[in-house]
Image: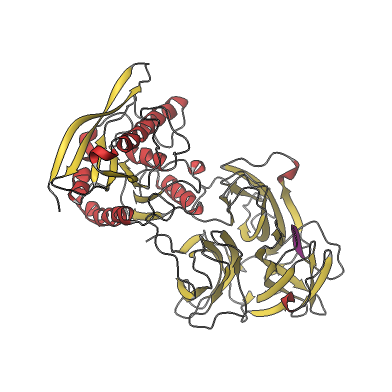
C-alpha cells in the first residue's frame, strides 16, 4: 500500500463553452509515492451533480484508494451546464451538455496517452469511472471510441479498457461489439437515473459480448455513498481494477471478463422443483464449433443437442425445455468452451407437457445429404404435437427448412434458416404428427438434418393452428436501431412463434416484450454480424388488445410466424428471468 502524492489543477486540455468562450480543463493527479513501476495502469474519475454542480474534489476518496494500490488516478473537472440535466436525456440542449462533458473525459484519456512516458503509465491500460453524471460520462467514453467529441490531443485514441459506473446509465443503442465493458453499482430503487435504464445499458453490453459485472443494492436509491454500500463496493472495484491491470491483452474484449466455461462441463441452473420450464439458451464467445445440451444434472451428455455453433467467436441462441429435478436443479452441458446465458420464459402447467427423455428422430449424416427441394419424414406419437429441436448442418448454400404435414405445400413460413454454405444452425419447432405418426421436413437447399424430440404437448394444452405469417418487414424499410415493431395475434393468449432476423445491419439482439415495456434483461434472438439471417423460437404473450412488440437493438428486417396458441392455464408465462450468465460475477 502506497502513500499518495497529489498534483492539483493540472491542465489537461481546453474546450469551448456553450456560450462560445474557451475554458481550461483541469484535473487533480494522484500518484503512488515512491513507485518505480514503468507501466502503471490509470483510472480517470468524474464527479456527479446533474451536469450542473460539483467539482473534482468529489472523487478524492476513490482516486486516493486507487493510487494507494499503485494506480495513477485522476479526478477531473469538466464543462457544466447552466441548469440540471435529468435522465434519460431528451432535449437537444441537454444532449449537448452531456456530450460536452463526455468529450472532456475523452480529452483526459487522450491527455494521459500524450503523457505516457513522463507519467510512466501504460497507455493501453486506462479505465474510467464516475458517479451519477460522472457515471453517464464514463459509460459514454467506454462505448464512444468511435464517436469522439471535439477536444484536445486528437492525435491520440480515446478508447479505454473499462468503465466503473456508480448509479449511471447510457444509450443502449450506442453499444457495439468493439466497445469496452463496465462494472455497474446501482440501487434497486434509484429514481434519479432509473434502475431500468441501467439494466438496459447492461443488457446491451452483454448482448454485444462485452465484459460486464452487475451489482445491484436492494432497497437503495441513487446515493450509494453510505458506509455499508461503500464497504461492499470497494472490494469489487479493486477486484475489477486489478483484472484490468493484470490482463494479458490490454483493452481487448477479454479484459476483466471471467473465464469461459471449460469444454465438457455441466453448469447447474435452478428453477422450480419437478416442473418443466422453457428457457432461452445462449452461447457467447465460444472457442470452437460444438453444441450445448440441457439435461438432468449428472446424466451422460450426447445423443441430442439444443444449440449448435459452427465456428469460434459466435453468439448463438436457441429455445429449450428444461425438466428441473425435485431439488429444482437442471444442467447445461457445453461441448466447447464458451460463456452461457440462460433466461427462463415460463412453465408448463401440470399435465400440459409430457417431458420425455430426449430422443433422436432423424440424423441424415450417415447417408447422402438431402437434395434441394426434398422432403424428409420423421415419426412420433400419432395425433400429437411435439417439441423438436431441428438442426441443419453442412448446408450446401443459403436456404430454409420448414416443418409441415407430409404432402402439404412448402413455403409461407420457415423454422430454420441458413445464410451461407457449410453452416450449422438449430432451432426448436412445434411439430404436428399425423394420424399415422408422420411429419415432414422440407429442405429448400441441400443440407443434412438432425431432429431431436424434447417432449409432447397434450391435446388440451395446444391449438396447433396452421403456421401463419404475422409480419414481414422486407416489403419496406427495416426497423431501425432501438425501434419497436408491433405484432398482433389472439388477444390475451400465449403463442409459440418463429422469429427471424434477416439483412441485419450489425451485431445485436431482438427481444419480444409487452408493448410499452422497457427493453433489456433478456433476449430472444441474437445476431453477431452484419447481413445475417437467423431464426429462433419464442413463447410470447399477446395483450388483452392482441398486441405484442418486438424490440430490435440493431436495425434488421423481421419475420414472425405463429406456430400455435397455448390454451388457457396450459403455460405460466412469467416475466423473463435470468437464471445464469457466466460472463458476470
Drawn side of residue 209 relative to residue 4, left or right: right
Q: Does 221 appear in magenta?
A: no
Q: Nearer the viewer, residue 499 or 287?
A: 287
Name the residue at 47% across, 26% down: 92
Q: Using the rendered image of the protein, determine whether residue 576 is visible from the camera's viewpoint.
A: yes
Q: Position of residue 179 (x, y in %)?
A: 45, 46
Drawn side of residue 489 relative to residue 411, left or right: left
Establish if 544 lies above or below 570: above
Q: Which of 109 and 359 is in front in this view?
A: 109
Q: Position of residue 272 (x, y in %)?
A: 48, 73
Looking at the rendered image, the quarter that the N terminus falls into is bottom left
Looking at the rendered image, the quarter that the C terminus falls into is bottom left
Q: Using the rendered image of the protein, determine whether residue 457 is visible from the camera's viewpoint.
A: no
Establish if 49 lies above or below 489: above
Q: Which of 209 and 468 is in front in this view?
A: 209
Drawn side of residue 347 relative to residue 453, left or right: left
Q: What stretch is highlighted in magenta?
A: 397-402
Amino acid at each position: 500500500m502506497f502513500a499518495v502524492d497529489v498534483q492539483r489543477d493540472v491542465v489537461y486540455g481546453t474546450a469551448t463553452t456553450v456560450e462560445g468562450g474557451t475554458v481550461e480543463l483541469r484535473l487533480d493527479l494522484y500518484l503512488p509515492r515512491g513507485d518505480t513501476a514503468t507501466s502503471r495502469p490509470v483510472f480517470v474519475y468524474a464527479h456527479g451533480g446533474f451536469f450542473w454542480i460539483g467539482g473534482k474534489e468529489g472523487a478524492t476518496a476513490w482516486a486516493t484508494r486507487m493510487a494507494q494500490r499503485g494506480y495513477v488516478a485522476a479526478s477531473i473537472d469538466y464543462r457544466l451546464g447552466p441548469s440540471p440535466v435529468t435522465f434519460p436525456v431528451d432535449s437537444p440542449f441537454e444532449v449537448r451538455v452531456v456530450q460536452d462533458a463526455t468529450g472532456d473525459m475523452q480529452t483526459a484519456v487522450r491527455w494521459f496517452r500524450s503523457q505516457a512516458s513522463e507519467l510512466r503509465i501504460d497507455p493501453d491500460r486506462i479505465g474510467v469511472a464516475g458517479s451519477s453524471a460522472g457515471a453517464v460520462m464514463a459509460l459514454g467514453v467506454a462505448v464512444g471510441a468511435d464517436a469522439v467529441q471535439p477536444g484536445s490531443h486528437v492525435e491520440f485514441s480515446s478508447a479505454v479498457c473499462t468503465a466503473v459506473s456508480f448509479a449511471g446509465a447510457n444509450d443502449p443503442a450506442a453499444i457495439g461489439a468493439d466497445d469496452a465493458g463496465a462494472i455497474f453499482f446501482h440501487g434497486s430503487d434509484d429514481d434519479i437515473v432509473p434502475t431500468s435504464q441501467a439494466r438496459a445499458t447492461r443488457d446491451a453490453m452483454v448482448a454485444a459480448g462485452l465484459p460486464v459485472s452487475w451489482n445491484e443494492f436492494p432497497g437503495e436509491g441513487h446515493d450509494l455513498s453510505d458506509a455499508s454500500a461503500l464497504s461492499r463496493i470497494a472490494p469489487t472495484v479493486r477486484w475489477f481494477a486489478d483484472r484490468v491491470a493484470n490482463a494479458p491483452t490490454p483493452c481487448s474484449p477479454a479484459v476483466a471478463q471471467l473465464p469461459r466455461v471449460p469444454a465438457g462441463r455441466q453448469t447447474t441452473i435452478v428453477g422450480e422443483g419437478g416442473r418443466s420450464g422453457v428457457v432461452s439458451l445462449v452461447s457467447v464467445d465460444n472457442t470452437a464449433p460444438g453444441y450445448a445440451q440441457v439435461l438432468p444434472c449428472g446424466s451422460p451428455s450426447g445423443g441430442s443437442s439444443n444449440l449448435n455453433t459452427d465456428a469460434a467467436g459466435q453468439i448463438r441462441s436457441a429455445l429449450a425445455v428444461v425438466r428441473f429435478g425435485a431439488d429444482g436443479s437442471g444442467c447445461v452441458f457445453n461441448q466447447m468452451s464458451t460463456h452461457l446465458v440462460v433466461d427462463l420464459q415460463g412453465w408448463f402447467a401440470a399435465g400440459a407437457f409430457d417431458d420425455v427423455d430426449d430422443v433422436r428422430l432423424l440424423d441424415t449424416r450417415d447417408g447422402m445429404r438431402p437434395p434441394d427441394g426434398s422432403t424428409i419424414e420423421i415419426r412420433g406419437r400419432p395425433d400429437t404435437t411435439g417439441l423438436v429441436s431441428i438442426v441443419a448442418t453442412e448446408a450446401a448454400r443459403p436456404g430454409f427448412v420448414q416443418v409441415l404435414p407430409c404432402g402439404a405445400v412448402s413455403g409461407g413460413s420457415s423454422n430454420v434458416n441458413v445464410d451461407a454454405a457449410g453452416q450449422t444452425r438449430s432451432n426448436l419447432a412445434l411439430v404436428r404428427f399425423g394420424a399415422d405418426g408422420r411429419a415432414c421436413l422440407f429442405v429448400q437447399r441441400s443440407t443434412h438434418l438432425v431432429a431431436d424430440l424434447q417432449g409432447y404437448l397434450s391435446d388440451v394444452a395446444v391449438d396447433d393452428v396452421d403456421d401463419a405469417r404475422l409480419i414481414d418487414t422486407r416489403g419496406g424499410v427495416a426497423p431501425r436501431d432501438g425501434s419497436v415493431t408491433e405484432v398482433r395475434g389472439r388477444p390475451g393468449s400465449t403463442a409459440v412463434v418463429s422469429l427471424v432476423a434477416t439483412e441485419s445491419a450489425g451485431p445485436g439482439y431482438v427481444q419480444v416484450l409487452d408493448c410499452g415495456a422497457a427493453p433489456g434483461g433478456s433476449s430472444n434472438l441474437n445476431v453477431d454480424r452484419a447481413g445475417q439471417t437467423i431464426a429462433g423460437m419464442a413463447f410470447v404473450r399477446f395483450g388483452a388488445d392482441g398486441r405484442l412488440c418486438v424490440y430490435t437493438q440493431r436495425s434488421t428486417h423481421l419475420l414472425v410466424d405463429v406456430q400455435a396458441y397455448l390454451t388457457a392455464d396450459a403455460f405460466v408465462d412469467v416475466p423473463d428471468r435470468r437464471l445464469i450468465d457466466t460472463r458476470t460475477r
